[in-house]
Image (tube, helix red, strand yellow):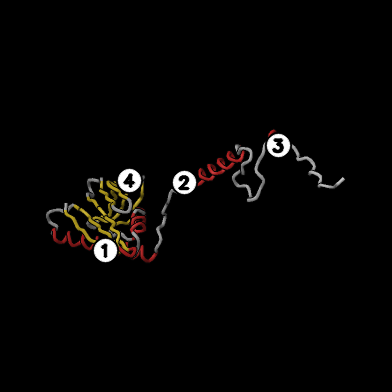
């Protein structure tokens, strides 16, 4: 297979760039030669587009994925061989360098290899330019999904634990102690059996009858 690699800098953080690139069904918005992408599951897609001037459909499989760092895929259809790899490199000031490498199978012997490479080179560069314009203009990741269930569970568990600890500490407080959460200056807790007898009358002053 022949290969073409291009790079571009994007004025967005690497996390945003990665999230946008992994919105697979939006590829037709910027990827030259791709008219439709249908995601079948987490790692398999069905692409439709133009290959050497002909309309075709082919299956694509994600072969490697490292969040915010790397995404690689390949065609599993024998009549449309090819593969791609994109690297996400964080840069200072919230920018990202995107490196896109595309491997393709040259055409028959009648096709000039130099011409085929030039066509693919233009496609790869146009794809990067289109992606840059899309993300820098829109600035949002359509269809992004974040799993916040873990954070929510942790927060609820923390609240429940704190309430249980406070309740238990209040119920088990020993006589003469201040229960947690009692306002300052409150009288220490005492149990019924430990109450002291009331004090007797004050002693009479000298000389009083």
Residue furthest to the front = 207
Disc 4 vs disc 3: Cβ atoms closer than 8 Å?
Answer: no
Eye-nearest disc, 4 or 2: 2
Is disc 4 placed on a helix, strand or loop?
loop
- Name the N-terminal-most of marks 4 and 1: 1
Dot 2 corresponds to which residue?
Answer: 149
Q: Residues within 10 Å of mark 2 (few under 14, many from 20)?
A: few
- Name the N-terminal-most of marks 4 and 2: 4
Near-viewer residue (182 or 104): 182
Residue 29 placement (x, y as % from top left):
35, 60
Q: Is residue 65 visible?
A: yes
Eye-nearest disc, 1 or 2: 2
In the rendered image, which quarter is residue 50 located in?
bottom left
Kindly identify the residue that appears in the image at 36 percent across and 65 percent down.
136
Q: Is residue 60 visible?
A: no
* Placement of 3 over or under 197, stated as above or below: below
Is disc 3 placed on a helix, strand or loop?
loop
Dot 4 corresponds to which residue?
Answer: 43
Dot 3 corresponds to which residue?
Answer: 195
Residue 177 placement (x, y as % from top left):
61, 42
Quote the CA–CA distance across marks 1 and 3.
81 Å
Disc 4 vs disc 1: Cβ atoms closer than 8 Å?
Answer: no
Which label number is shown at residue 8? Answer: 1
């Amino acid at each position: 297979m022949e290969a073409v690699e291009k790079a571009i800098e994007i004025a967005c953080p690497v996390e945003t760039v990665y999230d946008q690139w992994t919105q697979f069904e939006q590829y037709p918005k910027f990827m030259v030669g791709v008219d439709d992408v249908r995601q079948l599951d987490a790692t398999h897609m069905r692409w439709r587009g133009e290959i050497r001037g002909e309309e075709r459909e082919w299956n694509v499989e994600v072969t490697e994925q490292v969040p915010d760092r790397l995404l690689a895929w390949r065609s599993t259809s024998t009549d449309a061989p090819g593969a791609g790899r994109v690297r996400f490199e964080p840069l200072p000031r919230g920018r990202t360098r995107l490196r896109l490498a595309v491997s393709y199978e040259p055409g028959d012997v009648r096709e000039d290899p130099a011409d085929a490479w030039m066509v693919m080179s233009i496609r790869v560069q146009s794809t990067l330019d289109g992606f840059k314009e899309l993300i820098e203009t829109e600035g949002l990741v359509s269809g992004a999904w974040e799993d916040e269930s873990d954070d929510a569970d942790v927060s609820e568990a923390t609240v429940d634990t704190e309430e249980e600890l406070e309740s238990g500490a209040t119920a088990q407080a020993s006589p003469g102690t201040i229960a947690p959460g009692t306002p300052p200056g409150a009288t220490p807790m005492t149990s019924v059996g430990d109450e002291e007898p009331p004090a007797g009358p004050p002693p009479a002053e000298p000389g009083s009858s």
